[in-house]
Image (cartoon, helix red, strand yellow):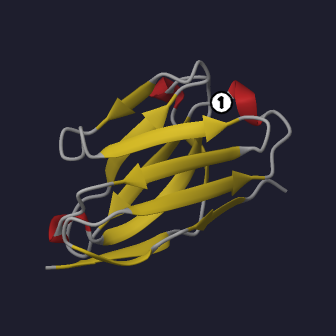
Amino acid sequence: QEQLVESGGGLAQSGGSLRLSCEASLSTFAMYAMGWFRQAPGKQRELVAAINSGERPDYADSVKGRFTISRDNAKNMVYLQMNDLRPADKAVYCCVRCSESNTRGGYASWGQGTQVTVSS
């Protein structure tokens, strides 16, 4: 059964950095786009970053220039480097595996999520 397991969340100060990791138990990992969603209490879920099978990244305007998504197909890993963190970045961050090589086909599986808290 496919699993996505996130790690790396925690507490950071405003202006600090965290790196999230997601390991996928999927032999065909390289074929699919991957992404990171976040959801804060009382706010709509937001796709903050995605990376397609060709390793082209895409970002929400709210994180552009601060967050970097990357993948290592040899390790079935996707990462989210978060720099210049702000209190508004506080949320539960979930790794997702897309149904296709890009994000247009929707999302096939989700991780449990990891909490990111940013203190001001």
Residue 56 percent across, percent down from the top left: 48, 22
The residue identified by callout 1 is: 32
Q: Residues within 10 Å of mark 1 (few under 14, many from 20)?
A: some
The front one of 77 and 18 is 18
The local secondary structure at tag 1 comes to: loop
Residue 36 percent across, percent down from the top left: 45, 50
The front one of 79 and 94 is 79
| Quarter the C terminus occupies | bottom left
Q: How many numbered markers are drawn?
A: 1
Q: Is residue 88 left or right of residue 19?
A: left
Q: Quadrant of residue 57?
A: top left
Residue at the limit of the structure toward the top, as seen here: 54
Say which residue appears at 48% left-offset and 29% top-offset: 103
What's the residue type where badge 1 is placed?
Tyr
Q: Is residue 111 above or below residue 58?
A: below
| Quarter the N terminus occupies | bottom right
Residue 44 visible in the shown view:
yes
Residue 89 percent across, percent down from the top left: 24, 64
Q: Quadrant of residue 7?
A: bottom right
Q: Is residue 42 above or below residue 56?
A: below
The front one of 7 and 34 is 7
Say which residue appears at 58% left-offset and 57% top-offset: 21
Residue 98 visible in the shown view:
no
